[in-house]
Amino acid sequence: MPTLPLALIDLDHTLLNTTHIKIDYRTLASAVEAFSHFTGNEVDRYLYPDTIAFITYIKKYFIPAIFTEGPADFQKAKISHSALAGLIDNNCRFVFDGFTKADQLSQLVALHHPKLLVDDNPKNLETAHYLNLITVRVKRGDHRADPDIASPDLTVASLQEIIEKDLFATFIIKV
């Protein structure tokens, strides 16, 4: 059986409602401190309602990988203290501290050969577009109103839209 291609999936504002974290903790420092003391799946309350179903769905077509930037311990805590820890293999968690995702994407493509990027940020999707990845823009979070820089292959308001319409079977399966 052939190996499925890798899909890079953004964490903040795509899988995780980071806006609610900002409201609850007000500062990055207080959120980092609180998350460092978590012991279970406390972060699940910040996952978008369609996150778990989407990760389950995408596994039919791709190997899902988290692709995120920010303070490494904080980003890793967001994953390890949520249901994502049981759904995404450790070797498929790409966390970049001190670098933007756009800066790291070409190296990640060269090393791991992903075929898809699911993200809310038009800048990351532009970089992915020029690296010949299939791009899916999720219009939610801080970048929902930002204009596209390069036209994504698919734009959705939620991950649920992809699941309900089985868009990967009808649109992206050409990988």
Image (cartoon, rainbow, N blue to C red):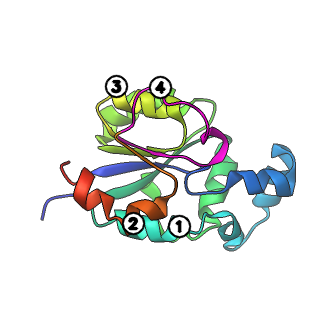
Three-letter residue code for mark 1 = Asp
Q: Tell me where residue 147 sits by quadrant.
A: top right
Check disc 2: other Cα within 10 Å, few if <14, some if 14-19, many if 20+.
some
In this rendering, is residue 99 above or below 170? above
Residue for point 64% across, 50% down: 75
Magenta segment? 135-152
Mark with earlier residue (4, 3)? 3
Instruction: Please indicate whether residue 121 sits to the left or right of residue 125 in the image.
Output: right
Mark with earlier residue (4, 1)? 1
User: Distance between the Cα atoms at labels 2 and 4?
Assistant: 26 Å
Percent across and percent down for residue 167 are 31, 58
Percent across and percent down for residue 87 are 46, 68
Q: Residue furthest left?
A: 1
Mark with earlier residue (2, 4)? 4
Three-letter residue code for mark 4 = Ile
Residue for point 44% across, 65% down: 54
Q: Which residue is tagged 3? A: 130
Considering the whole magenta stretch, tell me its main secondary structure: loop
Three-letter residue code for mark 3 = Tyr
Q: Tell me where residue 40 sits by quadrant.
A: bottom right
- Whether pointer 2 and pointer 1 mark residues with C-beta atoms closer than 8 Å, the reply is yes
On whether residue 15 falls in the magenta region, the answer is no
Check disc 3: other Cα within 10 Å, few if <14, some if 14-19, many if 20+.
few
User: Distance between the Cα atoms at labels 3 and 1?
Assistant: 28 Å
Instruction: Name the disc covering residue 163, or none.
Output: 2
Q: Quadrant of the N terminus?
A: bottom left
In this rendering, is residue 21 above or below 154? below
User: Distance between the Cα atoms at labels 4 and 1?
Assistant: 26 Å
Q: Which residue is tagged 1? A: 50
Q: Which residue is tagged 4? A: 149
Q: The residue tagged with tag 2: helix, strand or loop? A: helix
Instruction: Please indicate whether residue 3 sits to the left or right of residue 44 in the image.
Output: left
